[in-house]
Amino acid sequence: MHASSTKGVIVTVVIAVGLVLAAIVLPRLTPHFEHRRAARALLAALGVIVGLSAMLVIVPAGHVGVVDLFGAVAPDTLKSGIRMVNPFARVVRMTVQTQELKETMEAPSKEGLTMRIEVSVLYHVDPERASEIYRSLGENYVNVLLIPQFRSVSRSVTSGFDAKALYTSRDQLADLIASTLRERIGRRGIDVEATPLRRLDLPQRLSASIEDKLRAEQESQRMEFVLLREKQEAERKRIEAQGVADFQRIVSDGISDTLLRWKGIEATMKLAESANAKVVVIGAGKDGLPLILGGGKD
């Protein structure tokens, strides 16, 4: 409630007092007893209703009520709903819902470059400490505490990063702003939920050079991957060739002239024993003459 609400309470109390006085005075002016009795009852009922209305306040959902009685702030807050208070007290309704504050500002980098950033802060008031916030900061706590600290923290954090890090580490930057801001204002009863970084504009030349450097690094990483893959393929082929060579060596060592001669004799004997007519010449005998085997069917 603001000044107009306080005046409304005073007016309500004045009306209630006037109705009570009218209930006392009006019956004396009424000639008939029955009329005087009815008028007194009606005025008394109206007085009670008006008086009760001055003592009841409605605290909306997502809000708490801070009771201020002539400068004395009650330590406990009123929860949402219909509450009964001293009719002379002022009830300040403070939201405890999540609020968003957006700021666009000039911020420095570690190299001293100036960039433009757009960052938000999501926050809410601790319901149990709303009376403390009202007593120490007032209803305008956002402009008194939150905005100055938010701007100061944002600039302080960005000054610890070089331009490239600001461009590539936005999530880390946002988390650091949030944690630093919590340390500064959390003890005052304002809870910081997050500080998302919405936009970061670097000088055009610097932004272009950073993008070129990032592309060069990506290309270098791609080439390193290709070279590694080719090296692995060459190693695989070398191992495969070594395996083939080892196999051939083992087979070659196992084949002797005696074995080959014996296998040739076996094949020749099988061929000579077949029923088909043939003449088989298998080389020279001990006397230097060819050895002829075979013959046809009789």
Image (cartoon, helix red, strand yellow):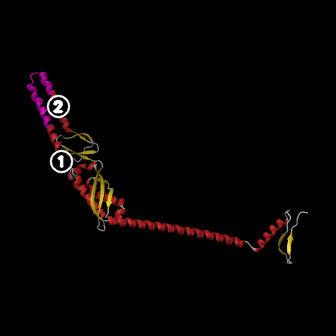
Q: Which mark is residue 291?
A: none
In the rendered structure, which disc, 1 or 2, sits on the residue that comes first in sequence?
A: 2
Q: Is residue 135 magenta?
A: no
Q: Is the residue under label 2 in contact with that under label 1 (CB below 8 Å)?
A: no
Q: Which mark is residue 46?
A: 2
Q: Nearer the viewer, residue 6 or 163?
A: 163
Tag 1: Cα neighbours inside 10 Å, few (<14), some, or many (≥20)? few
Query: Looking at the rendering, which quadrant does residue 105 occupy?
Result: bottom left
One can see residue 26 in this view: yes
Q: Nearer the viewer, residue 163 or 100?
A: 163
**Left or right for 75, reference 220:** left
The x, y position of residue 16, in whole percent, is 15, 35
Is 128 placed left or right of 216 in the picture? left
Rounded to the nearest whole Å, what is the CA distance between mark 1 and mark 2? 31 Å
Callout 1 amino acid: Ala
Side (left or right) of 285 relative to 115: right
Residue 242 percent location from the top left of the image: 62, 71
What residue span does the magenta drawing correspond to? 13-40
Mark seen at residue 72: 1
Majority secondary structure of the magenta segment?
helix
Image spot of residue 102 (x, y percent): 28, 54
Q: Amino acid at mark 2?
A: Leu
